[in-house]
Amino acid sequence: MLEIDEGQVRQSEAAYPQHAASIALTINGESCQLQVDARTTLLDALRDRLHLTGTKKGCGLGQCGACTVLVDGRRVVSCLTLAVMNQGKSITTIEGIGDGELHPLQKAFVEHDGFQCGYCTPGQIMSAIGLIQEGRTRSDDEIRENMSGNLCRCGAYTNIVKAIKDALVQGVDAPEAMRQAVEAIRQDAEKGE
Amino acid sequence: MVPLSYIAVATPEAAIRRTAEGQGAEYIAGGTDMIQLLQEGIVAPLELVDINGIAFDDVSVAIDGIRIGAMARLSDVADDPVIRERVPVVSRALYESASPQVRNMATVGGNLLQRTRCLYFRDATTPCNKRVPGSGCSALDGQNRVNAILGGSDHCIAAYPGDLAVALVAVDAELMVTGPTGERTILVENLHQLPGDTPHIETVLKPGDLITAIWIPLAAAGRRSHYLKVRDRTTFEWSLASAAVSLGLHDDVILDARVAVGGVGTKPWRLRHVEDMLVNQRLDQALARAAGECSADGAEPRGQNAFKVTLLRRTVERALLQIGGLA
């Protein structure tokens, strides 16, 4: 159950009620309504207002990928979108991917030592889910290229690629709509080669 | 970030009304550059007009060209089968832009208008004529490794950072623009302006103008095309030099040529003199070398960016070799 922390409304937000808006989001399948200042990023709304702190704040400028979440099934960096711009959207965070147990990618990251300090890991895993749904996993190089939006300062890249490949073998369920899109991309790519 | 208000609009008319009055309202679409600029205190609009609700986001093929809705996301356009097949230079330029996450967010219209990565423009504590007109240019004698070698002035040498616009110049693309006075078209080549003594004015767009679509004429889509981007790391980085080449070939003879370069100019830079020397010639290694050699003619390096002169020559040469299957 999501709780909205009204105590975390920032002073600057409270001081300018004319710049606030009420938005409805679906977060990990749960509907929620919250009042946010126009300046609040989706990332800050998730962490500070909804206490979903699995999504990490790294650079705040779209360069590190630690804040990667899925919006309507597509991976994005939540630091470069305002919460108000996501009215009516469906957000999936690292808290929403396991169904009572670890998601296959989480298991694979543990199995293959896909992290050391762990700070970038939620973003890596959300990005990898997006990557797999996009079907850009046909070679190690393609995985590396398409995970380039996620930096790991511990340098676990080699094992991150291994973990993603292993999760692929184990099977990662993608939503039906994404499966169809992936099929279209694959067919197109085969034609082009 | 200073307080600002926010409004989402669903039609171009509503969007234009909101920004045309000059009351400090700015469009926000993908938001991937705008939010960086807000976070760093580089821009301070009073209101953001969210145009994501305007559904101009498809790629469609007409009898005389390809139309890309301005709200289409970079990843969707890069993946589009028509774009991949007919104008690979555009698909390639998009795949090599930003990161997968950012490509899922950023729109093609907004991408054309992304602001420079000049270190001083992005650092609000330093003088910058583009950010604060008349304050001076810190890059002229400063950390100018990423700055432009073509098209600079004594007031600004900021490089235009994008890839898509460079590719679009090579395929004669036009923009469809709607504004307070109606609709008009602008060649992508004419969108950006030289800095001169007004580097804060970057494009020919006026308050309220909204890019609604990109148009690529089918004649250009019939040429063979290629994009080569050279950067400090292999991915997720802005270009140091890039070349967008589009050639009409009959056997190995070049009948028609477009060569545009990025990362080196204050705007997407078309090399007409290189195009002229390519036409009616057989594409071989000697021609590629000769074309590369003269591609940096007129360059004005300013210290740390001097390496770009050689880099640009080699980038153009290599792009030509690649398009001809010679490399």
Image: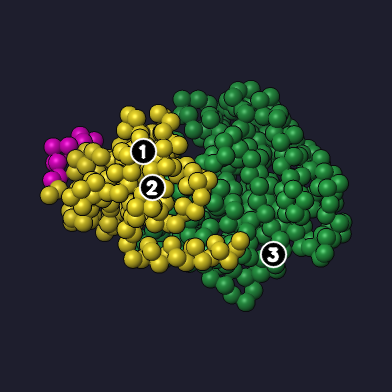
Chain colours: A yellow, B green
Residue B119 % position (x, y)? 53, 30
Instruction: Give the class, few, some or many, for how many residues have Cα within 10 Å of label 1's Cα (few <14, many ≥20).
Output: some
Query: Position of B153 compared to A93: left or right?
Result: right
Of the residues shown, which amino acid type is indicated by label 2? Answer: Asp
Q: Is residue B102 magenta?
A: no
Of the residues shown, which amino acid type is indicated by label 3? Answer: Ala
Residue at image point 59% right, 24% down: B143
Q: Give the structural element (helix, strand or loop) at label 3.
A: helix
Q: Which residue is mark 2?
A: A166
Q: Which residue is mark 3?
A: B220
Chain on which label 3 sits: B
Q: Which residue is mark 1?
A: A112
Observer-nearest of A86 and B236: B236
Vertical placement of B204 versus B215: above or below?
A: above
Q: Quadrant of residue B7?
A: bottom left
**How far is the residue under mark 3 from the one under mark 2?**
44 Å
Asked if the residue under mark 3 is in contact with the one under mark 1, i.e. CB atoms within 8 Å, the reply is no
Of the residues shown, which amino acid type is indicated by label 1? Answer: His
Q: Which residues are magenta?
A: A3-13
Residue at image point 34% right, 30% down: A116
Q: Are marks 3 and 2 on the same chain?
A: no
Instruction: Give the class, few, some or many, for how many residues have Cα within 10 Å of label 2's Cα (few <14, many ≥20).
Output: some
Asked if the residue under mark 2 is in contact with the one under mark 3, i.e. CB atoms within 8 Å, the reply is no
